[in-house]
Image (cartoon, helix red, strand yellow):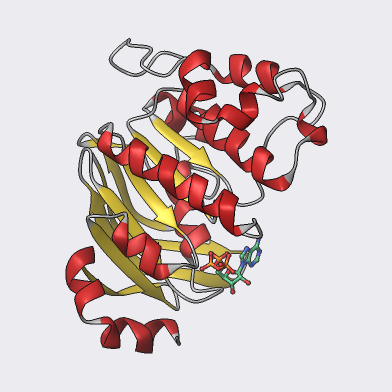
């Protein structure tokens, strides 16, 4: 569905991505692993059009999309849950969800407000609360809910469980598993590499702006030694 090839991205003079290539096939869950500062978020920001690559290609369904702005990428069916959440603090839970609503690229509205609330019962209890009145976990759920309301074909989750209590973390992984079985492709960044591998089909490991290891998640999980070296665990 999305393929990127030879991506080089800079922040000013800092060369961050050094020729990154990979693909996310339709309905496939892909994990993106790597220590802090290795370029995972920069890769996502490059794919989403927040940063323009200096070199390289991004293709969506075979069409060149590198450099398209984030709203155009969203229209192609890519939902993004950024690190740090990105909800509207002054709008209620309901307003946050309704504002994001959009049919999918196939014209269908598989994800509705009702379905998001059934998925996250905690949000149903907070429907009229402002975004700024939610706990960190609820804000994260709302952020995922907003992305689902766009009926994406690919959902990108960057550190969706960071800083949350274990019970909430477990709840979010349960939802991620449900999203996977519903046929939405995912690109998942999370510090918990075991859970990332357990919830994905394939995984990419980044080091210093390059993909240094990739393979089937089950195979990486079965032989964690190579991974441990790359991740420093
Ligand atoms: N806006 C920016 N301007 C300049 N340098 C940046 C900017 N954002 C990130 N960097 C640098 O780019 C490198 C890659 O950062 P990035 O956030 O992509 O890494 P990451 O693998 O996602 O790590 P983390 O888990 O810490 O977010 C780091 O050295 C970081 O300091």
Q: Which quadrant would the N terminus be assigned to in this image?
A: top left
* Left or right of residue 184, residue 35 in this image: right
The residue at 50%/70% (across/down) is: 16
Residue 25 in the image, given as x and y percentages of width and height: 20, 44
Of residue 14 and residue 44, the one placed in the foreground of this image is 44
Residue 19 in the image, given as x and y percentages of width and height: 34, 68
Find residue 134 and report its image quarter: top right
Residue 3 in the image, given as x and y percentages of width and height: 25, 48
Q: Is residue 217 above or below residue 184?
A: below
Find residue 17 and report its image quarter: bottom left
* Left or right of residue 179, residue 96 in this image: right
- Any part of residue 216 in sight: no
- Any part of residue 206 in sight: yes
Residue 89 in the image, given as x and y percentages of width and height: 79, 32
The residue at 45%/87% (across/down) is: 232
The quarter of the image that holds ligand 1 is bottom right
The residue at 54%/42% (across/down) is: 81
């Amino acid at each position: 569905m999305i393929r990127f090839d030879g991506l080089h991205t800079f922040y000013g003079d800092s060369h961050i991505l050094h020729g990154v290539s990979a693909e996310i096939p339709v309905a496939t869950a892909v994990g993106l692993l790597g220590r802090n500062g290795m370029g995972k978020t920069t890769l996502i920001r490059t794919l989403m059009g927040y940063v323009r690559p200096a070199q390289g290609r991004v293709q969506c369904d075979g069409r060149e999309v590198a450099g398209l702005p984030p709203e155009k990428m969203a229209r192609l069916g890519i939902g993004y849950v950024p690190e740090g959440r990105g909800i509207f603090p002054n709008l209620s839970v309901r307003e946050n969800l309704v504002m994001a609503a959009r049919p999918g690229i196939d014209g269908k509205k598989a994800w509705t407000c009702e379905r998001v609330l059934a998925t996250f019962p905690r949000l149903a209890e907070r429907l009229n609360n402002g975004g700024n009145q939610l706990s960190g976990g609820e804000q994260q759920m709302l952020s995922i809910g907003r992305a689902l309301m766009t009926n994406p074909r690919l959902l990108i989750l960057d550190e969706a469980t960071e800083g949350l209590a274990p019970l909430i973390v477990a709840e979010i992984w349960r939802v991620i598993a449900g999203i996977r079985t519903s046929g939405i492709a995912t690109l998942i960044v999370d510090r918990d590499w075991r859970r990332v591998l357990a919830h994905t089909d394939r995984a990419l490991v980044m080091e210093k702006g390059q993909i240094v290891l990739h393979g089937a998640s089950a195979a990486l999980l079965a032989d964690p030694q190579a991974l441990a070296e790359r991740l420093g665990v």
